[in-house]
Each structure stands twice: as structure tokens, then as C-alpha cells.
Image (tube, grey):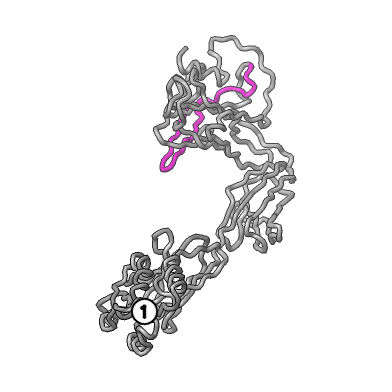
Amino acid sequence: MSLPARIGRFFGRRSLSTPQPERAAVSSAPREVINDAQAYGVEIKAATVAPGGWYWQAVRVHHLTPEENGGNHHIYLDILDPAIGAGTNPNGGRVYGARARVTWDGGEQIVTVDKPPNEPGTNFPMWKWQVCAAEARGLPGLELPSDRVTGLHTGHPDEAPGNTLFHHSFSITFVKVQAPLTVYRDSIIYGVIHNGAGRTARLLEGERRMAEQVVGADEAFRFAELVAGDYVVEVVDAGLRSEPIHLDGRNRVQLELTVVLAESVIHGRVHNGRGRTVTLVRDEAAVASQAVGADETFRFEGLSAGAYRVALEGADVASELLALDGRNSIAVELFAPAAGKLLGHYLLLGPADRPATQANLVLAQEYILAFRPSFGFSAEEAAAAGMVTILAAADAVSEETAAGLAADGTPVQRIAGTVEEVAQALAARIASGQPFGRTQ
């Protein structure tokens, strides 16, 4: 049996030579819909039509079996009218000359019903990776609203010979029907808006505001007594909208929305940083920057959840990773190297012949590997650095020496104490990713 003949069986077609019995009146009411292609991601978007209005209903969407398809990659369409005689077909007869529209990202094509009665009315071959939608138009000049069938594509896995990757087909039958005259007002849209307590939920039909309500502490909302139509729920001032929701006047639709909070703050101080630029980094990409104020402070507001760092431009200085949840606030303290210095960071130890200096040098090995400062025993060398860490007690490197190093604005910190205290201080800086903990 030829492919058109195989497909034709599923559209209820008979040959013109077949005697047809007298036909009883065929109902124009909407049909019960059959969509066995849902498992393939195919959906039917209902037409919006006034009570008593005529429209094209997608009454059957079928994914062809391997035996029916035979290796093809098509959309097969038929457009029927109950007012046209069609023997025993309860959906009526074919509307020759009626048109359907197939759309995809960046294009569309009109196809016309013109095939023999034993074949589907028309077809459209799908390309590899193309994702299509189809709707009926009707006869030229007599177009009606139509259901829209979406998610049609060939990129499904192998099933059996006849249905393999990029070789899948679908058949769609549209029937001319009349919407009920009775207007039902029993539809309900309800659900939860996470992080939405105290915010305003707004119901829209198109861009027309239908209702509003404040979301309670339980984050629930409910819009009731709704007529048929296409609606959207939005959260005011949150940049959040639901997908379009089709109501028939009697159905109930449950939603779950989540407001992405963007209320976190990162603020802090850059010692010796007035006028310098700090950059906020997320996922290795800069998301904002600002100049440090005359008071050496900065502030980034309106931040959503995520992991951030604050980096000082023109210097190898950055904060540790900062975890935001969309609501919290984190303070950061950075130290900018003094400008115009030959060295970036210098680790100044006490006199080389002292046992305490030798012990500190052993303790400092991981710190040196982590931050790669220059290091030595000379205050004169340290004076050439933009920032200085003194790893020695005051009897080894005097307070006068420390004050002299800091006199031109160079950040200076001292780490001293017992072996345990020095080890803990160095480990804390390594863990935070910050070579500095406090100034002298």
C-alpha cells in the first residue's frame, strides 16, 4: 500500500468510486480531542473564540507508527467541515482549497488542501532540526480562528525501521466547529508564588488588567469565576509572568511561580583605595563596576542569588567568594597597594639569625605559595612594595619601622604571637583568599 493510502486511512478518507450511504446530520459542536503525540512534546494551543463563534478545532493529532510512516518526515494535514457530505465520517467532508499555515523560527509556509480523497489533504516536509507549529486557515477570504498544534519535529530517537532519527511524521485533522453559546464563568487559576508574600499578583487578558490581589504569607493566590479566554498571571514589579493560560470557562489551572530575589547587597571598604575602581564578578564575568568613594567605601545593590567576588582593578586584589541568597548583605574589606611601587606585596621577616624568624619562615611557606609575595629581611626592600606584611614581633621589626613603611599610605599588617597564633592567622588568610586581615 502506498504511503498516501496508508496515511489516508487515518483521515477517514474513502475513494470517490466507493458508494456512500445517506448521511445523517453531523454535529457542529466541538469534538473530544485525541492527541497521541503528547509523548513527543506535541501540544494543542486552543483557539480564542467568542461564544457561538466558528473556528477550526484540532480534533486529532497522531504520531505515525513505523509501519505508517515508512521513513518519511512530514506533517500531514486535513481540513474538514461537518456541513460537507462525507459518508459515515462523523467529522464531515474535506474542504478542498482550504489552506493551513506551518510556521517555524524565522519562517512560515502556506499549504493547500488539494490531494486525492484517498490521501491526506496536504502535507509539509520537515527539515532536520526544524521545530514547527501548524494551524488551519480555511478558504481564502473565509479564514477562521484555529487551534495551534506546536512542537512538531523529527528529532526523535530511533524506534524501528520507518521511524528513525529525523524520520518521524505527524498527522493532524482540523474540523470546523462552533463554540458553545453558553458562557461559563467557573474557571479558576490558583497556585503559589515562591518569595511572593506581600507582593501583588495581577491577572491579565492580553494587556487588559482583570484582577489583582496581594499574596498572603502562605504565598498562595487564587483568581476565580473566570470566563473562557487566554490569561497571564504576573507579579507586579518583579519582572515575572506566567506562560499563557487557556481557560474554557469550566477548567481549573494550577501555577507555581518563583520570584527571583534581587535584594542582596555587597558593600565595604578599600583601604588606600579612594578613586580606584572595584569590579563585581560572577561566574568569571564582570557584572558591575564603580569608583571607590572619597571615604574609601563602595556598595553594590540589587543583587540576585549567586557567588560573587569583588576585584580591585589594576591590582592582584580580590575578595573571597561571597555567597548571596537574594536577600542578605555582606561586608568586604580590601587593601589597595600603594601606587608607584616597584613591588606588589612584601613579607618582611625579622633578623635572619633569630630562631623565631626561622620558625616564622617555616610557618609562612603555605602563605607564600598562596599569595606569592616577595619576602626577605630588609625594611629598605619592603619600602619598595605597595603593601607589606610584617611577620615578626615588635622586638624584631620595630613599631617605628612599621609606621615608617605606612607613612606614605602603604597598607601594613603585622602577624605575631605564639607559634599557634601565627599559624592560625596565616591559615585564616589562606582560607579567605585574602593576604591582608587588618592594617597596622
Where is residue 175? Give x, y as percent: 60, 29
Closer-to-camera residue (164/265): 265
- Image quarter for residue 27? top right
| Residue in the picture at 70% in, 55% down | 220
Closer-to-camera residue (351/437): 351
- Image quarter for residue 392? bottom left
Is 320 drawn above or below residue 90 in the view shown? below
| Residue in the picture at 47% in, 12% down | 1
- Image quarter for residue 338? bottom left
Is 164 drawn above or below residue 284 in the view shown? above
Residue 244 on the magenta segment:
no
| Residue in the picture at 47% in, 18% down | 4
**Visible in this render: residue 142?**
no
Describe the element under mark 1 as helix, strand or loop: strand
Residue type, label 1: Ile
Closer-to-camera residue (232/134): 232
Q: Which residues are magenta?
A: 88-113
Q: Which residue is mark 1?
A: 390
